[in-house]
Amino acid sequence: MRKQNVLRVVLVLAVLALALNAVSVKAQSPVAIRWYVGLGAGTDAGLIEKQQKVVDDFNATHDDIELTLEVVDNAQAYDVLNTQIAADNAPDVVGPMGVRGRASFPGAWLDLTDLIASTKYDLSDFDPALVDFYHIQGEGQLGIPFAVFPYFMMYNKALFDEADLPYPPKAYGEKYVDADGNEKEWNIETVTELARMLTVDENGNDATMEGFDNTKIVQWGFGVSHTDMRGRDTLFGAGNLVDADGNAQIPDNWRAAEKWYHDAMYGKQAFYPSGAYSGSDLLAGGNWFGSGNVAMVPIHQWYMGWGTADLTAAWDLAPIPSYNGTITAKLHADTFGILRYSKHPAEAFTVLTYLLGEKAEELATAYGGMPARLSLQKDFYTGYAESLKAGYPNTNFDVNWEVAVAALSYPDNPNHEEGMPSFLEASNRYTEYLQVVDNNADADVDAELDKLKADLQKIFDAAKTK
């Protein structure tokens, strides 16, 4: 009997030892979660340091998870992520990324619906419409709102002053009042008229004058920079290059936009930088507004700071003009996603909610966006302007920020960055189209758009058979 008792004690002690050892191993081996940055902002040196600080803060307060930061330059980030996924070495959390980043990897993202429900994650601090923005039919809730980047018109007040032209309106719904006191709708037609008066050749003639030389322009009235074909065409209204049935299309409003752009580049009264000028030193290698040589440029908030770092001229913000009575201020919105290949989705969701929670304002501001959380938006631009001034003391940021907030009421639907079949191949094809029309004064825009549609149809058809 004594031997049996001794044996029982030994067994109990052994079990306890194993349990303690398991606890010790667990404590010593937190779950490894990788945060992949590169599909959007976050790759600049200063941002890498700030993101690493977020990682360090997380690890200091979470013993069960070890978070690591993985930053890949945007030019290689898409290919690298594809390679990692193919090699069964995918990261867990990816972001920040916009619609384009998410749409470049269709079917790769985890539906967060169950995790939101099981953790009782509170979505009440977000605009329901923005939450729904990330609910993709057939794929589920692929993200939670993180940051928004309003779209607005930046204009160079000094160039308006030189031309003796009144500034654009300050708010949506206001009319433009010209030099003679006449009220005009703030639309594409009014912008075209102003842009021609603000465009100057090397002899000092503006685009409305008889002696104007459209081959020797040194100052332009208008330009849409830092975007692609779909982005610039959305100034004329929302659209998509693929219809509801998966077939290629060129929306009528986008066809009108492309013809307008080409005439604006090469017409007798040209006022828009052509392909030959777009990356020139005169336009600061592509930083059109920052060069000080383009009077009006629609741009997103992420441009602030670095894009205006050397801009000493006075400038301000104005509403996006309407087209055919409709205002479309295209929306850029960032989020973080979890890849469905993650081996630890629950822990990845803990990381994701940390980034969207107490670090939301810090990160959103660092990336140049406005937090999507409604509770963080009040008085946001006061602090944002101060942070910009600290980083870029040569530039004035006391501007009309109210128009940025108002722009959120006019988003594009469908979004201009939404997915297409064979997304990267389709994107490359419309980029080739731009190279032809933007660099060729004699280009037949209608014919080139027809070719683009036909080629996109072939790409979409091939995708259906894969």
Image (spheres, rainbow, N blue to C red):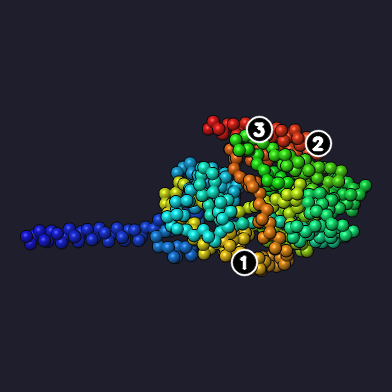
Q: Secondary structure at mark 3?
A: helix
The residue lying toward the viewer, choosing from 307 and 450, is: 450
State if disc 2 and disc 1 touch (CB < 8 Å): no
Q: Secondary structure at mark 1?
A: loop
The residue lying toward the viewer, choosing from 194 and 426, is: 194
Q: According to the image, label 3 marks what residue?
A: 455
State if disc 2 and disc 3 touch (CB < 8 Å): no
Q: Which mark is residue 174?
A: none
- Relative horizontal placement of residue 17, taking residue 341 as reference (left or right): left
Residue 234 visible in the shown view: yes
Q: Residues within 10 Å of mark 1 (few under 14, many from 20)?
A: few
Q: According to the image, label 1 marks what residue?
A: 378
Q: Residues within 10 Å of mark 2 (few under 14, many from 20)?
A: few
Front of the two marks 1 and 3: 1
* Residue at 88% from the left image edge and 46% from the top image edge: 213
The residue lying toward the viewer, choosing from 190 and 57, is: 190
The residue lying toward the viewer, choosing from 170 and 275, is: 170
Q: Position of residue 333 (x, y in %)?
A: 60, 54
- Residue type at tag 2: Asp
- Residue type at tag 1: Lys
The disc, 1 or 3, on the residue closer to the chain's N-terminal end is 1
